[in-house]
Image (spheres, rainbow, N blue to C red):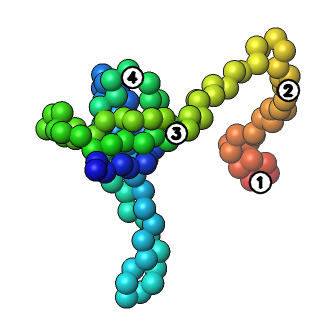
Amino acid sequence: MARKITGIVSSNKADKTIHITVTSRLTHPLYGKQYTRSRKFAAHDEKNEAKIGDKVEIEEVRPISKTKSFKLTQVLERGHEQVSIKEEPAAQAEVKVEVKKETKKVAKKDEDEEKAK
């Protein structure tokens, strides 16, 4: 029976290939501290259906290439799509203009002359 793994798609840049990150939480045997370990697997995605952030299931198959030994079986859960923030047009946005008073500084020569008198 082939091994099945569930993970999150971390990259889909290559054609018909996705990279899945599988994270597991472990406890150190001596110190008891919990830590996270992650592994990346390359999998074959024939239809290019998986997107970044999707939770997918992959299955072990014969080696497809040097790094690919898994194929995508199903997309379990769709990830969140990237949301772009639109800025308001300049005409509608409120603009506050602050006017600062300029103060002129008296030159040091004038101050020195006044002190001398």
* Residue 31 in view: yes
Between 33 and 7, the one lying in front of the other is 7
Q: Amino acid at mark 1?
A: Lys
Dot 3 or dot 2, earlier in sequence = 3
* Res. 48 image quadrant: top left
The residues tagged by marks 2 and 4 sit, at their Cα atoms, a distance apart of: 49 Å
Q: Amino acid at mark 4?
A: Asn
* Res. 72 image quadrant: top left
- Position of 13 with respect to 105 (left or right) is left
| Front position among marks 2 and 1 | 2
| Front position among marks 3 and 2 | 3
The residue that disc 4 covers is 48
* Res. 38 image quadrant: bottom left
- Position of 41 with respect to 78 (left or right) is left
The residues tagged by marks 3 and 1 sit, at their Cα atoms, a distance apart of: 85 Å
Which x, y percent locates residue 83? 63, 28
The residue that disc 1 covers is 115
Who's the residue at 77% across and 54% down the image?
115
- Position of 86 with respect to 58 (left or right) is right
Who's the residue at 58% across and 29% down the image?
82
Dot 3 or dot 1, earlier in sequence = 3
Which residue appears farthest toward the front when viewing the image? Answer: 1
The residue that disc 2 covers is 96
Who's the residue at 34% across and 38% down the image?
19
Who's the residue at 81% across and 36% down the image?
103
Q: Please tell me whether residue 117 is drawn above or below residue 43 in the rendered image.
A: below
Dot 4 or dot 1, earlier in sequence = 4
The residue that disc 3 covers is 76
